[in-house]
Image: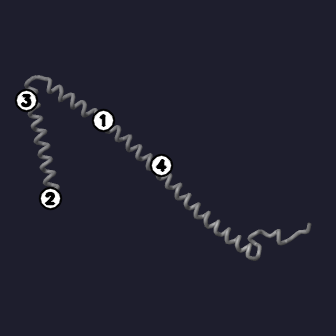
């Protein structure tokens, strides 16, 4: 066999319609690979953002769970005191009536003030 210099050249260096067509295909493939690399990079950054957001939300939910637990403890102790007040003697019942009246008046005042505030807008 003899050495053929045309076969030794690369496909890109070939002259003629076949070489130009291969160069066009290579160029398109290169452009598409760059576009795909950009999309992969965007997808990776989006996945990292989602991971960070999920971590922050889990941390926030854990904190809210602790806050609700402490609030539950405060409410249960307050309810225990109210029950103790109701089961005690006559003098404490009078104080309980005054406290209930105060709570009702306080709630009515808050409702009235908030209705005046929101109706003024």
> Position of 67 compared to 7: left or right?
left
Instruction: Give the residue pinned by disc 3.
Output: 94
> Position of 3 compared to 14: left or right?
right
Which is more N-terminal, label 2 or label 1?
1
Which is more N-terminal, label 3 or label 2?
3
Instruction: Give the residue pinned by disc 4.
Output: 51
Q: Residue at x 10, y 42 (%)?
A: 105
Q: Which of marks 1 and 2 is in front?
A: 2
Q: Residue at x 44, y 46 (%)?
A: 55
- From mark 1 to mark 2, how far is it between C-alphas? 37 Å
Locate residue 45, reporting x and y percent. 51, 55
Crowd around label 4: few <14 · some 14–19 · many ≥20 (10 Å): few
Residue 35 sits in quarter? bottom right
What label does residue 70 carry, if any?
Answer: 1
Which is more N-terminal, label 3 or label 4?
4
Instruction: Give the residue pinned by disc 2.
Output: 120
Which is more N-terminal, label 1 or label 3?
1
- From mark 2 to mark 3, how far is it between C-alphas? 39 Å
Q: In which quarter of the image is the N terminus?
A: bottom right
- From mark 4 to mark 3, how far is it between C-alphas? 58 Å
- From mark 4 to mark 1, how far is it between C-alphas? 29 Å
Locate residue 13, reporting x and y percent. 76, 72
Which is more N-terminal, label 4 or label 2?
4
Which is more N-terminal, label 1 or label 4?
4
Q: Which of 19 and 81 is in front in this view?
A: 19
Q: Nearer the viewer, residue 35 or 18?
A: 18
Q: What element carries label 2?
A: loop
């Amino acid at each position: 066999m003899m050495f053929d210099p045309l076969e030794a050249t690369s496909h890109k260096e070939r002259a003629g319609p076949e070489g130009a067509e291969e160069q066009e295909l290579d160029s398109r493939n290169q452009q598409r690979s760059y576009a795909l690399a950009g999309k992969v990079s965007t997808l990776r950054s989006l996945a990292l953002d989602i991971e960070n957001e999920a971590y922050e939300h889990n941390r926030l939910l854990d904190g809210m769970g602790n806050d609700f637990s402490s609030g539950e403890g405060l409410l249960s102790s307050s309810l225990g005191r109210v029950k103790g007040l109701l089961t005690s003697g006559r003098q404490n019942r009078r104080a309980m009536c005054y406290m209930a009246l105060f709570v009702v008046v306080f709630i009515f005042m808050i409702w009235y003030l908030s209705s005046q505030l929101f109706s003024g807008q």
